[in-house]
Image (cartoon, rainbow, N blue to C red):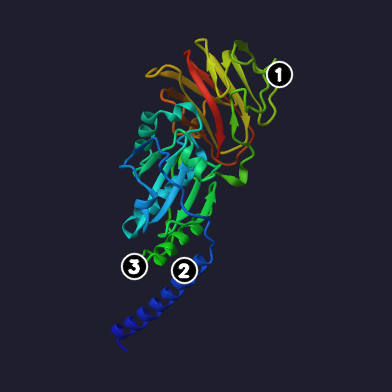
């Protein structure tokens, strides 16, 4: 039997199997109940990367709606998949819409969102949801949150938080097929995420996200506690327990942040995780504040993050999430000190990975 005949037979078998698999996937998706019609996008206060979009204009397309805020580490780790899906399926009927709903006040600054979207290669349409109108219409409560909408405008699937990427992609494929798409790429994407976008080391993560303002902070251990909205000179406790933190120097604790008043101040944290990130920035727009990190009293060396060097040096400028530490295994409890060398440093939250 010639190679051409064998090739034809194999192609026929593979095609049949692929069609059977596509039918099975489509049937599975058809069994997903509708979660209701897509809410309006009219609540957007502004659009980036696109003219204003409406649910009516999107009818006939498969739509992925991604709720995000640019300092959220959980969203950052899902972004490589969203970018990959946009590139893989954008020519096959998928439209990605990012809804940026701010967690911190500075994230409502559209110039900040535009800068970070460009820096992180977020090229799909972005609805600025500063009034939480779209958030409320979707009855959403999470960053990140993903909603998949079929060609009839019905929400067919949602994913809250990270993970389930293969499941989400399979549903994208089958919704596209259900919508009449042809030659839809098979398989699931493989991403090579780096920096803050790399998946967390879930097996060795024993520290949870924490806020530094007095409203939601946990584990603060400087003597006397946080004083609300007043300058205070803080000092370290005699010892740190895991997942506790402290201040040293002249700081003012606000509702959602701590702000350094003196020319020298420190945040210390005892944690157990591969990665440590801090949401922070300079109080004065355009200012640059040098800082240095120490791990167990020493320069981080190879354990430095993408925003610090091997000596621990970094520069605080715009308000965003900074990756300070990426350790190598084995992971142990560590003490980190962030030493700021200039007044006006602001810190909002600490996250881990």
Cα distance between the residues tagged 1 and 3: 66 Å
What element does badge 3 sit on? loop
Q: Which residue was labeled with disc 2?
A: 26
Q: Quadrant of the C terminus?
A: top right
Tell me residue 317's x, y (percent).
41, 23
- Residue at (60%, 31%) from the top-left corner? 210
Cα distance between the residues tagged 2 and 3: 13 Å
Cα distance between the residues tagged 1 and 2: 61 Å
- Dot 1: few (<14), some (14–19), or many (≥20) neighbours within 10 Å? few
Give the number of the disc on residue 238: 1
What element does badge 2 sit on? helix
Tell me the mark number nearer the camera, choosing from 1 and 3.
3
Tell me residue 254's x, y (percent).
57, 19
- Residue at (47%, 13%) from the top-left corner? 342
- Dot 2: few (<14), some (14–19), or many (≥20) neighbours within 10 Å? some
Seen from the viewer's position, the closer of residues 63 and 352 is 63
Tell me residue 245's x, y (percent).
63, 25
């Amino acid at each position: 039997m010639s190679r051409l005949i064998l090739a034809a037979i194999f192609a026929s078998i593979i095609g049949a199997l692929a069609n059977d698999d596509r039918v099975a996937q489509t049937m599975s998706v058809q069994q997903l109940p509708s979660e209701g019609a897509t809410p309006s996008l009219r609540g957007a206060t502004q659009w980036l990367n696109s003219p204003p979009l409406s649910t009516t204009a999107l009818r006939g397309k498969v739509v992925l709606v991604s709720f995000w805020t640019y300092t959220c580490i959980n969203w950052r780790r899902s972004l490589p998949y969203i970018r990959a899906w946009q590139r893989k399926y954008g020519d096959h009927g998928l439209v990605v819409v990012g809804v940026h709903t701010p967690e911190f006040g500075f994230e409502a600054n559209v110039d900040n969102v535009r800068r970070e979207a460009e820096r992180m290669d977020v090229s799909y349409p972005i609805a600025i949801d500063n009034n939480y109108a779209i958030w409320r219409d979707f009855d959403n409560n999470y960053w990140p949150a993903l909603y998949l909408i079929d060609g009839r405008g019905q929400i067919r699937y949602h994913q809250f938080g990270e993970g389930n990427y293969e499941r989400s992609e399979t549903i994208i494929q089958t919704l596209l097929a259900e919508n009449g798409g042809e030659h839809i790429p098979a398989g699931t994407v493989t991403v090579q995420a780096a920096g803050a976008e790399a998946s967390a080391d879930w097996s060795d993560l024993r520290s949870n996200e924490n806020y530094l303002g007095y409203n939601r902070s946990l584990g603060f251990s400087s003597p006397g506690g946080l004083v609300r909205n007043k300058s205070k000179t803080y000092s370290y406790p005699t010892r740190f327990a895991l997942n506790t933190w402290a201040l040293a120097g002249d700081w003012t604790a606000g509702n959602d942040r701590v702000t350094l008043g003196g020319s020298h101040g420190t945040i210390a944290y005892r944690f157990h995780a591969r990665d440590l990130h801090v949401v922070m920035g300079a109080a004065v727009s355009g200012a640059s504040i040098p800082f240095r990190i120490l791990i167990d009293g020493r320069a981080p060396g190879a354990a430095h993050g993408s925003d610090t060097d091997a000596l621990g040096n970094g520069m605080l400028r715009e308000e965003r999430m900074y990756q300070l530490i990426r350790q190598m295994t084995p992971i142990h409890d560590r003490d980190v000190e962030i030493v700021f060398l200039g007044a006006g440093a602001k810190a909002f939250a600490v996250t881990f990975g």
